[in-house]
Image (cartoon, coloured by chain):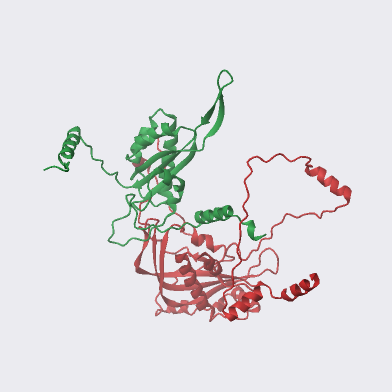
Chain colours: A red, B green
Amino acid sequence: MATSICRTLKYFQPITCQNIKYVASLLDVRLPQPVFVPIRSKKRYFIPPAVNVKTQPEQEAKARAAGVVVRQQYIERPINISCTAGIFDPYVPPEGDARLSTLSKEGLKQRTEQLRQSAASQLSIRKIKDHDPDFSTKAFPELAQQIFIDAHAALTQFNKEKLHSLVTERCYPEMVRGNRYKTLRWRFIESLEPPRVVHARCPDMISKGNLYGQVTLRMHSRQTLAIYDRFGRLMLGDEDEPRDVLEYLVMERHLVNPYGRWRLHGKIVPAWAPPKDPIIKTVMIPGPKLKPEDEFENLNYQIPKPKAVQWYK
Amino acid sequence: MAASALTWAGLASIGRACGHIRSRLLGSSSTLSQVSCLHTSPELNSKHWERRNLIVYPPQQKDEPRRPAEIHHCRRQIKYSKDKMWYLAKLIRGMTIDQALTQLEFNDKKGAKIVKEVLLEAQDMAVKNHNVEYKSNLYIAESFSGKGKYLKRIRYHGRGMFGIMDKVHCHYFVKLVEGVPPKVEQKTGFDQAKEYVEQLRNRTIIHSL
């Protein structure tokens, strides 16, 4: 009797849960889901102290005497780094980009400035093409623009999973910080100029062969942004007023990883960028500490202006 | 047996944790506390006081009146009696925040210092996190105290008798709202008397001619 049961069990073993589910999906049969039955146990308010319990060194000594060898346990936690910490050798956008009209001679020169100028960028692009044969300087900007639009749409809906797949781990906190309890309304209206690749670098992190590709794109587009605070009041921007925006996006991919994807890594804000609009509310900037006999007007206090440097978002 | 490792208590705690982590509850139209569908008595409110700071309202249209910002703040397990704290909470109900802070600064009670700290924290939070423009433009809409968890100790009496001493703790809750405090109508004695007489006159006498 026992052997026959074993035989039947061996027959049924290949039909694992996955197979059953597969068969069920083919036949369109509703299988009963596994039922989790909780165990009821009584909570003990007084747990008596354990008797004859050996301390840790005594237990170890006993194990050693018995000849039990415990392999050394390494308390390690593997960390997967899938993006770099910053933008290596950043692109410095030329002053006056997108200010000159295309019809003037200067404008034409700017427009036709090709990537061929920079040898390092060419080398990096060749390295990227080694690892990723589908990469091409002509087709990539369209893809990248689509990733940018999708990432910002996911940010508006606050879809964490989709955002993580479209944006690197370095860029994610910068995009998301402070926005958790705010409502964002963002719309990409149109692209004024076709986006193009302006810069590329292939840094490697920690070990020599661990290559990451960083490609900078120049994008001139029209967008609408409105940020509402927790109570639905407008904090910044206008939903109906489109603005022309010139951006330098940095896309990154972990080239050595076969499952790596091109993701948004950051933005470069040039030093000559126009200042942003102020927020709608008034903000108090802390001033110098006054003694009782001083007056603020008599102090001639200069409000410190921030230096115009290129920074990365 | 692996299935039964998850008890209902575990599931409930996980559910609560999920609720805490990802609570983007959309505020419905019931922004005022007079809506009857919500329980607004202090006993039922106090458990989720911190969560009320996490509700996000949908963006307002341009023609709607500006929704005033509401900031909920509390301090738990203060070493003070809830009945003594009630006097301070009742004192500052309905005042502007500056007025409340001044009153508490010159009050001699122990709880006054604590309530002042709580108010300053709430004001700071309002300006930094909740997009309140002017820090003096706040008033105290709700302020009350609740019972915290008591520690029990033995108080020794004569003749071998003992009593259980409670080491009292209390919670203090405050809700700051942006704007000018609503004017409370002061009723004079004459008005109250007039109302009383009106009530007497409006009585109907049943089974009469």
Left or right, A170 with reference to A224: right
Q: Image height check: is A172 above or below B143?
A: below
The residue nearer to you, when weighing A221 against A169, is A169
Farthest-out residue, top: B159
The residue nearer to you, when weighing A221 against B74, is B74
The residue nearer to you, when weighing A12 against B48, is A12
Question: Image point 80% across, 54% down: which residue?
Answer: A72
Q: Where is residue A297 in the image (x, y as percent from the top left)?
A: 34, 42
Left or right, A306 with reference to B15: left
Q: Residue B160 falls in which quadrant of the image?
A: top right
On the question of residue A94 being in view, the answer is no
Question: Image point 68% across, 63% down: which residue?
Answer: A206
Question: Image point 64% across, 63% down: which residue?
Answer: A81
Q: Where is residue A224 in the image (x, y as percent from the top left)?
A: 39, 68
Left or right, B94 with reference to A139: left
Q: Where is residue B176 in the image (x, y as percent from the top left)?
A: 37, 45
Q: Position of residue B188 (x, y in %)?
A: 20, 34
On the question of residue B178 being in view, the answer is yes
Farthest-out residue, left: B209
